[in-house]
Amino acid sequence: MTAPRVSPGVPVGYDPSDVPVYEDTAARDEAYYRAEREETPFLAVERYEGGYAITYDLLPAGYELARPARKELTEQLSQKIEAVVNHLYDDYPDEHPYSDLQIPRSEAGTPDPWVLGSSPSSAAIAAKLGLPYCFAAFIRPQLATQSFEAYREQFQPSSLAGGVDEPEGMIAVNAVCAETDDEAARLRAVAEASYKRMQRGVVGTRPSIEEAIDELGSVPEPTPATLDAGDWPRAISGSPETVASLLEQFAERVGIDEVMIQHIHATHDDALRSHELIADGVGLNYQ
């Protein structure tokens, strides 16, 4: 999609027919990060097997989605989320064509549905469906506070199976933990270099620690144990004590009490050790 550059505050509208459909994740990611680099709007529908589609948006200051497109795409995404919930709980009415479909299940019970998003628009969808909302702080952390404000302001008790009566939130944070802040920063180089690769349109690759440091030019600075108000890095690192403090700060900022850890590590062993140390830092028994 090619869009004109405009000054901040000047909206540019898009019709639904202008929104491209990407047939695979690689094509979508390449277009997304190109738009991010060029600070141009990005909106797309990604098609999966069976016709499942998800919308993505990247609208910098000065752009907004035209109202008809926003309404249509919000409805499409809401319907997809409702379909997932109905499948999870076998909640389709008997006359529905999907009522006889069965999905594989574990013996642990039905999973709780959450909406994962990184913008106020996704928060609004979760609110109107009455579902718990998880904010992806590893994508656009600067929108966390605004997104949770939208979620709480627009929340409606759910009529869906698996819905909630009160707002319920979580944040997903890219976190790397090691015995010391300096060692954790060295491990975080993999995440930082991976983000820069994606910004260049290089997706689906992950550097080793040494490759990451070489691409960055140096080992990243350790994440401060206390962050300034409004400072929310895309990835954090530190000792168990430092990471625990940072997670608590983030949780307090947006008024939630649950955090999900997302990571980009060079090896599986590094990831397991990092999670073990984070669990120690926050007082959980590592399983």
Image (cartoon, rainbow, N blue to C red):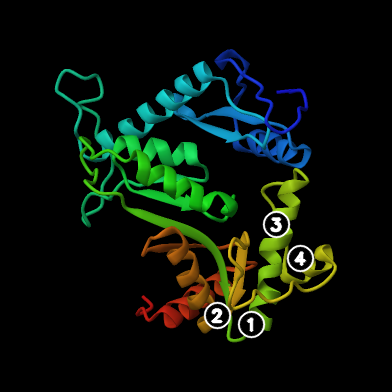
Instruction: Quarter of the image for the C terminus: give it.
Output: bottom left
Labels 1 and 2 touching (C-beta < 8 A): yes
Spatial CA distance of label 4 from label 3 is 8 Å
Q: What residue type is labelled 3?
A: Ser
Provide the residue designation for mark 2.
242
Q: In the structure shown, which secondary structural element does the residue marked by tag 2 occupy?
A: helix
- Which corner quadrant of the image does residue 178 belong to? bottom right
Q: In this view, does 68 lie above or below 168?
A: above
Provide the residue designation for mark 4.
212
Q: Which amino acid does label 2 sit on?
A: Thr
Provide the residue designation for mark 3.
194
Classify residue 251 as left or right of residue 26.
left
Residue 71: x %, y % from top left:
45, 21
- Front residue of this view, candidates 228 and 96: 228
Query: Nearer the N terminus, badge 3 or badge 1?
Result: 1
Provide the residue designation for mark 1.
181
Q: In the structure shown, which secondary structural element does the residue marked by tag 3 occupy?
A: helix
Spatial CA distance of label 3 from label 2 is 23 Å
Labels 3 and 2 touching (C-beta < 8 A): no
Q: What residue type is labelled 1?
A: Asp
